Amino acid sequence: MNDRELMELAQKARETSYSPYSRFRVGAALLTKSGKVYTGCNIENASYPATVCAERTAIFKAVSEGEKEFEALAIVGGREGETADFCAPCGVCRQVVAEFCPPAFKILLGNPAKFKAYTLEMLLPLSFTGSDL
Ligand code: THU
């Protein structure tokens, strides 16, 4: 599984986004160290705070299946009807990634045709984690 293939899976996961309120559709694909991929989309709710982002859907699916060792996360998002360009993960999702992944963990942002690799540390510097407790 190369980076572009992971981005393609994130793009595919975006198709099932349930986002009638924001009309902003996001897909995520999480590659485990064992080579499996868990995908997720954003799932909104009429009670807006009950919404869950695509990244957390993917992470929670994986963790609930017993996976906790991750290699990379790809994120593809954008307005409904538009080609996804660039979608940065929200702060809550960055914090959830930090719960399971080291600072050097790879996060791919953009779309399958044009994307860039970041590290978790770049997106969440000076993070607060379990090792602080
Ligand atoms: N959203 C995600 O799923 N991931 C992100 O990285 C940013 C935002 C969703 C949440 C909500 O359904 C919609 O995008 C607008 O905020």
Image (cartoon, rainbow, N blue to C red):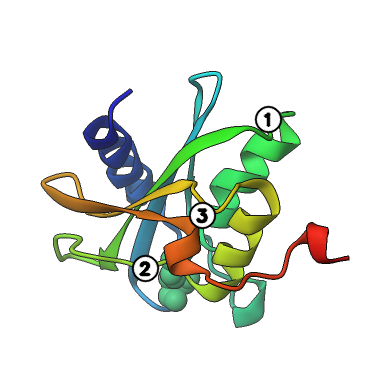
Q: Is residue 59 above or below residue 83?
A: above
Residue under the image location 34 percent in, 73 percent down: 23
Residue under the image location 82 percent in, 66 percent down: 132
Q: CA distance from mark 1 to mark 3?
A: 15 Å
Can you tell which quarter of the image residue 133 is in? Answer: bottom right
Of the residues under marks 1 and 3, which one precedes in the sequence? 3
Report x, y in % for residue 81: 17, 65
In the foreground, 16 or 127 = 127
Q: Is residue 89 visible?
A: yes
| Residue corresponding to mark 1 | 67
| Residue corresponding to mark 3 | 55
In the foreground, 81 or 92 = 92
Q: CA distance from mark 2 to mark 1?
A: 24 Å
Residue under the image location 60 percent in, 73 percent down: 126
Of the residues under marks 2 and 3, which one precedes in the sequence? 3
What amino acid type is highlighted by mark number 3?
Answer: Glu
Mark in the foreground, 2 or 3: 2
| Residue corresponding to mark 2 | 88
In the foreground, 100 or 42 = 100
Q: Is residue 62 above or below residue 80?
A: above
Report x, y in % for residue 19: 43, 67
Tags 1 and 3 touching, CB below 8 Å? no
Count neighbours of disc 3 (C-alpha within 10 A) and say few if under 14, some if 14 to 19, many if 20 or more: many
What amino acid type is highlighted by mark number 1?
Answer: Glu
Mark 3 beta carbon near ligand 1 (under 8 Å): yes
